[in-house]
Amino acid sequence: MALIVILLCFGVGGGIIGKSKGSSFFLWFLISFCVPFIGVLTTAVYRSDRDELRRECAGCGRILMLHDAICTRCGTEQDFPEVAIAPESQSRRRVPASVDPAG
């Protein structure tokens, strides 16, 4: 019984950290529940989706992450944009940010 309580605590902790970084609560809950120490550490060092540049889909207009190659809504293949939308963490508005293809 004590093991289940400990696993639930790790799962909830990993889920909360994952959700705060813009990812799925349930995905990180399951990872942290099944692999307690490693799961929570992985969640802590995982990149934050809220800090990633975004772009607008040419087909349907949905806002996608810059690294997405295909739109999950309409299936349109995305070319690398000249201008990207600022990360969600910087602004809730659609502010263009320049993209340097060299890296």
Image (tube, grey):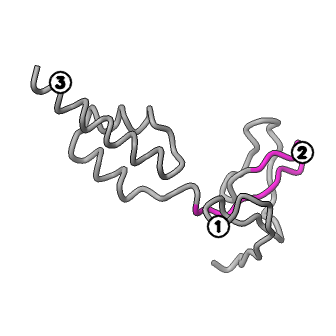
> Given this view, does label 1 or label 3 mark the residue nearer the observer?
1
Whether residue 35 sits left or right of residue 49 in the image: it is: left
What is the magenta range? 51-63
Disc assigned to residue 4: 3
Indicate the amino acid at tag 3.
Ile
Q: Quadrant of the C terminus?
A: bottom right
Residue for badge 1: 90
Mark 1 or 2, nearer chain start = 2
User: Crowdedness of circle 3 by 10 Å Cα count: few (<14), some, many (20+)?
Assistant: few
Circle 3: element type: helix
Task: Depth check: give the residue in front, 73 or 17.
Answer: 17
Secondary structure that dominates the magenta span: loop
The residue most toward the right is: 59
Q: Crowding at label 2, few (<14), some or many (≥20) Cα neighbours within 10 Å?
A: few
Q: Looking at the picture, how far across and down is residue 9, in whole percent? A: 24, 35
**Quick check: 7 above or below 22?**
above
Tell me the quarter of the picture where residue 89 sits: bottom right
- Helix, strand or loop at label 2? It is loop
User: Residue at image x 47%, y 44%?
Assistant: 19
Give the residue displayed 30% in from the left and 35% down from the top. 11
Percent across and percent down for residue 21 are 49, 52
Q: Amino acid at mark 1?
A: Gln
- The three-letter amino acid code for the residue at tag 2 is Gly
Residue 12 picture location, percent across and down: 33, 36
Give the mark nearest the N terminus, 1 or 3. 3
Residue named by callout 2: 59
Question: In this image, 4 relative to 15: left or right?
Answer: left
Nearer the observer, 39 or 69: 39
Q: Is residue 34 above or below residue 44?
A: above
Inspect the magenta stretch and tell me whether residue 57 lies in it.
Answer: yes
